[in-house]
Image: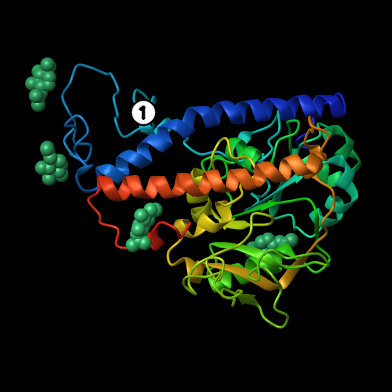
Amino acid sequence: MEKNGRIRGGKDSLYVALGTITGVILGFMIGISLPNLDKTTEQFRFYSNAKGNYGGQNKSSGNPKNSSSTKINVPENPRGAETLPPAIIQPETDFYLRRLWGKPNEDLKYKQKYLVAFTVGAKQKQSIDASVKKFSSNFTILLFHYDNRASEWDEFEWSKRAIHVSVRKQAKWWYAKRFLHPDIVASYEYIFLWDEDLGLQHFNAEEYIKLVRKHGLEISQPALETKGYLSWKMTQRQPGKDIHRYVKERDGWCSDPHLPPCAGFVEIMAPVFSRKAWRCAWYLIQNDLVHGWGLDLSLQSCVEPAHEKIGVVDSQWVVHKMLPTLGNEGSSNDGRQPWVAVRERCFNEWSIFKSRMKEAKIKYYKENGIIIEANSTLNKN
Ligand SMILES: *[C@@H]1O[C@H](CO)[C@@H](O)[C@H](O)[C@H]1NC(C)=O
Ligand SMILES: *[C@@H]1O[C@H](CO)[C@@H](O)[C@H](O)[C@H]1NC(C)=O
Ligand SMILES: *[C@@H]1O[C@H](CO)[C@@H](O)[C@H](O)[C@H]1NC(C)=O
Ligand SMILES: *[C@@H]1O[C@H](CO)[C@@H](O)[C@H](O)[C@H]1NC(C)=O
């Protein structure tokens, strides 16, 4: 829309610039993600006696210390930044594009409030172009290119104000873990993390946000319609409703009507997170489990109560197009179709994730002297 983000010298320079932005973001993430992990654990462990426990300092003491030393040491700062005066520290950032000239405080005419990230290949360019138009100017558009063809998107005007991250043959959750750290996307109230094979003819993002806000949904997805097979009843559109939070699944599928896949559940295909829910969900993403299978069944651990704050929006729905996408980017070394090997890994990741989650819970309960009465607690995903 505005030309601010552009650099003289044409489109190649633009991508160099975006590459640099990416590099900076990545560097920033490496710098801040570790201390945060650490901090979270610490806060958790020492929750009750954390204050005043750091090196015996008392920050809130009103009397200025009479010290000849001007050395700064603030243990509460992000890890590694203890020697900085706290007021200079910027622990969070954003994807807002700035100019290379003029006054910094005049760079941004407005700040987008929402983020939509699509994982795309240039084959789906036309479909994504149509989808992007369903998102207002309140959205920052972020494209993860798995085919390394980012420059081909320049034909679209909106592409010039989008953030392009190009890394070959990676999956949505791989990108999300690396480029959407909660401190990186802290400016955005809602985060859409979507696949590319969705038809958005019955969808409007602003209307969608109004609904999730109204119903207090921290994690949601638009209802699905498809000519193909739907894995879960939960995501199927219920015509005439605004939203739904519960479904009746097939007999024996739900140990409890408040639990997945009957409630507290959306799929990994088109999830939408509130800022708060994303701050938890990001930590749940495993670095090596790139397809994210099983993650959806565990998202309930991030919001309380999950059966109230997770839901599906029926009146703004999408069509699952079942197009050949990243699934076809696999590699077959034994003569099988590439998608077969990808699918196999998906299922394998799912079972790895399930057992990791289960073991992590057992560890926690053991360390905290909590007696688990029934195994069902552990099998809740
Ligand atoms: C820290 O400051 C608070 C408020 O001024 C005071 O009540 C408290 O006694 C102080 N603690 C120490 C250890 O100095
Ligand atoms: C502060 O330090 C100076 C110089 O060392 C000293 O003269 C002064 O008495 C000290 N003031 C207090 C309140 O300790
Ligand atoms: C952007 O958000 C504001 C506040 O929610 C709203 O008033 C405005 O209509 C939105 N812009 C568009 C283009 O929908
Ligand atoms: C719990 O699971 C273990 C092994 O997974 C099994 O041996 C045990 O009988 C189960 N207990 C209950 C109460 O189901």
- Examine the rendered structure and indicate whether residue 377 appears above or below residue 334: below
Q: Examine the rendering and report whether any part of residue 186 can be seen.
A: no
Looking at the image, the residue that sits furthest to the top is 68
Q: At 79% from the left edge and 32% from the top edge, which residue is drawn?
A: 334
Q: Residues within 10 Å of mark 1 (few under 14, many from 20)?
A: few
Q: Quadrant of ligand 1?
A: top left
Q: Examine the rendering and report whether any part of residue 368 can be seen.
A: yes
- Colour style of the rendered protein structure: rainbow
Q: At 19% from the left edge and 38% from the top edge, which residue is drawn?
A: 52
Looking at the image, the residue that sits furthest to the bottom is 240
For badge 1, the amino acid type reads: Pro
Of residues 120 and 323, which is closer to you in this image? 323
Q: Is residue 244 left or right of residue 307?
A: right
Res 6 → quadrant: top right
Q: Is residue 203 left or right of residue 176?
A: right
* Percent x, y of residue 378: 40, 56
Of residues 150 and 228, which is closer to you in this image? 228
* Percent x, y of residue 261: 56, 66
Q: Is residue 294 left or right of residue 193?
A: left
Residue hosting label 1: 85
- Examine the rendered structure and indicate whether residue 52 appears above or below residue 140: above
* Percent x, y of residue 296: 57, 56
Q: At 45% from the left edge and 57% from the top edge, which residue is drawn?
A: 301
Of residues 13 and 268, which is closer to you in this image? 268
Res 172 → quadrant: top right
